[in-house]
Amino acid sequence: MPALFEKEALKAQAIAARSYVLSKRINTNQSLKITSTINDQVFLTTEELKEKWSNNYFSYYNKVKDCVKSTSNLVLKQNGKIVRSYYFSMSNGYTQDSELVFGEKNFTSVESKWESEKIKNFLVSTKIKKEDFLAKLDLSNKNFIINNINRTKTNHVDIIEINNVKFNGIEFRKIFNLRSTDFTIKESENDIIIRTKGYGHGVGMSQYGANEMAKLGYNYKEILTHYYNNTEIANI
């Protein structure tokens, strides 16, 4: 989450990140091994932060540190256990059911009405050469026909059928490294244009949504209980 975000959003992020990490150790009794990848928690070293933040390093560092310390020992729990609190960059207006994306029944979809086109890169278009597009899908047929698109109740693509071959929306997103599974496809003479809305897997807390909520006066508890339904904020 960008350090320039509102403090209440950063507090919510601190609790979500802490819960995500500790859920791996406490709920599975495994040793805590966290890598700086999307498989765990993407983080930067002190030196990397100094390079990234430059002259703002001390103000940003102290701001984030204060948000972490002020929520010390707080986590999200569900049925008495620390919950795997997924989060992502920005929604398309709704979050996703965790069962649809990760096969876990922790969270159901909620509305996230605070994101819109006023946020940079909320809508992004990607242009791909038609032959490259078909090759990546392993479709030898030079024709391009969208037979059908099935969407979830949150407008994310569940199944897309192209040239009579079906693809899962999540799989399709990975193949083309798309920003989200809420996308539309248009064909031009030589290209395929894919337009995405939002950014990320869509499960749990939307970081940009949290920041917009904080701007409106919501506190971190209200942010967390909105995005992580059927959970409570409690001590470790």
Image (tube, helix red, strand yellow):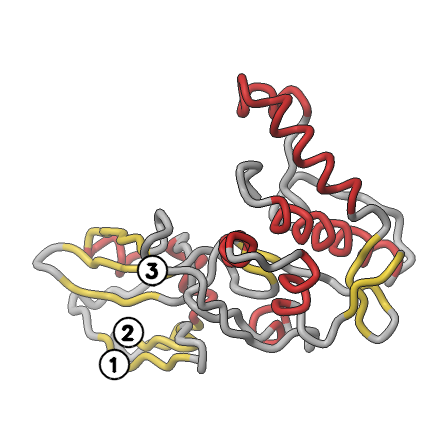
Report the residue at 52% width, 69% height from top.
95
**Along the horizontal axis of the image, is 159 left or right of 235?**
left
Answer with mark 3 or mark 1, whichever residue precedes in sequence: 1
- Mark 3 sits on what residue? 196
Disc 2/disc 1 C-alpha distance (Å): 6 Å
- Mark 1 sits on what residue? 147
Residue 52's place in the image compared with 25, above or below, is above
Answer with mark 2 or mark 1, whichever residue precedes in sequence: 1
Answer with mark 2 or mark 3, whichever residue precedes in sequence: 2
Number of marks in the image? 3
Front residue (pair 158, 153): 153
Image location (x, y in percent) of residue 54: 53, 18
- Mark 2 sits on what residue? 162
Residue type beneath disc 3: Thr
Report the residue at 57% width, 75% height from top.
97
Q: Name, please, the residue furthest toward the front.
A: 217
Front residue (pair 148, 206): 206
Image location (x, y in percent) of residue 30: 88, 54
| 10 Å crowding of disc 2: few (<14), some (14-19), many (20+) | some
| 10 Å crowding of disc 3: few (<14), some (14-19), many (20+) | many
Which label sits on residue 220? none
Disc 2/disc 3 C-alpha distance (Å): 18 Å
Report the residue at 41% width, 65% height from top.
92
Image location (x, y in percent) of residue 190: 11, 55
As helix, strand or loop, the secondary structure at mark 2 comes to strand
Q: Looking at the rendering, which quadrant does residue 5 occupy?
A: top right
Image location (x, y in percent) of residue 48: 61, 23
- Quarter of the picture holding the N terminus: top right
Residue type beneath disc 2: Ile
Circles 2 and 1: CB distance less than 8 Å? yes
Looking at the rendered image, the disc whose residue lies closer to the viewer, 2 or 3, is: 3
